[in-house]
Image (tube, grey):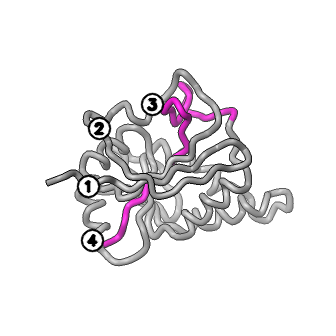
Amino acid sequence: MRPVIYYITITPDGMYADPDGGLDGFDPAEEEHRYANRLMRDTGDLVMGRVMYGVMDYWDELDLDDPNTPDVECEFATFWRETPKHVVSRGDPELRANATKLQGDVVEEVRRMKHGDGSPIGLGGGAELFATATKAGLIDEYRFLLAPMALGDGKRLFAELKEPLRLRLIGSTTYPSGSILLEYARLEEPR
C-alpha cells in the first residue's frame, strides 16, 4: 500500500496563507528547500487542490537554462515537472503537461491510488482538501514546516476539522532560518 504524505508550510498560529492567499515574508532557506526537493523527488503521484496547483505554476514557468536560477530551484522544478499531478477541482481548470483533473470522488480516487504499487502519494491543498482527506483517514503522515512568523489573520489550515486530529511525532528539524519541520504519523484511533 502506498502512503499518503501531506506537506505544507504553516505559521505557528495555524495559517497556510494570508487573506490574499500568499505567505509573504517567508522565504525558505536552502536547507528547507532541499527537504522539499527530496520529498518531491520521492513522490510517485501528487494530488492537489486547484488553488495550490495554480500557486505552484511558478515551477512550470521557471527557466532552467537561466544561469541566475539557483540550483536548488532548478532541482525542485525538475522533480515537479516529472511528477504526475492529479488536480481536485469542481470546475475545468487549465492544466499543463503531466497534470490531469482528478475525476470522481476524491476520497475514492485517492483510496484507489493508495492500494496500488509505487512511491508515496503527495497531497497538497488548503483547509477543505486537508479536512476531507483527514476525515477519511487517507493521510498517513503530516509534515508541517512552521514558518517563523505569525499572521493573526488569514487562511486557517485546521478550520474545517470537526474532530480532534491525533498525531504521533516521528521527527523534527530546526533550521538556521528559525523554521521548524514537524513530522507526524496519524495516530490510529483505539478500536
Q: Are marks 2 and 4 in contact (CB under 8 Å)?
A: no
For label 4, count other residues whose C-alpha is less than 10 Å away and answer few (under 14), some (14-19) or many (20+).
few
Q: Position of residue 189 (x, y in %)?
A: 22, 51
Residue bearing mark 1: 188
For label 1, count other residues whose C-alpha is less than 10 Å away and answer few (under 14), some (14-19) or many (20+).
few
Q: Which amino acid, by three-letter code, is at mark 3? A: Arg
The span from disc 1 to disc 4 (Cα, nearest Å) is 19 Å
Q: Which amino acid, by three-letter code, is at mark 2? A: Pro
Q: Earlier in the sequence, mark 2 or mark 4?
A: 4
Residue bearing mark 2: 164
The span from disc 3 to disc 2 (Cα, nearest Å) is 15 Å
Q: What quarter of the picture does the N terminus occupy? A: bottom left
Residue bearing mark 4: 115
The residue lying furthest to the left in this view is 191
Let me know if residue 72 is in the magenta part.
no
The span from disc 2 to disc 4 (Cα, nearest Å) is 26 Å
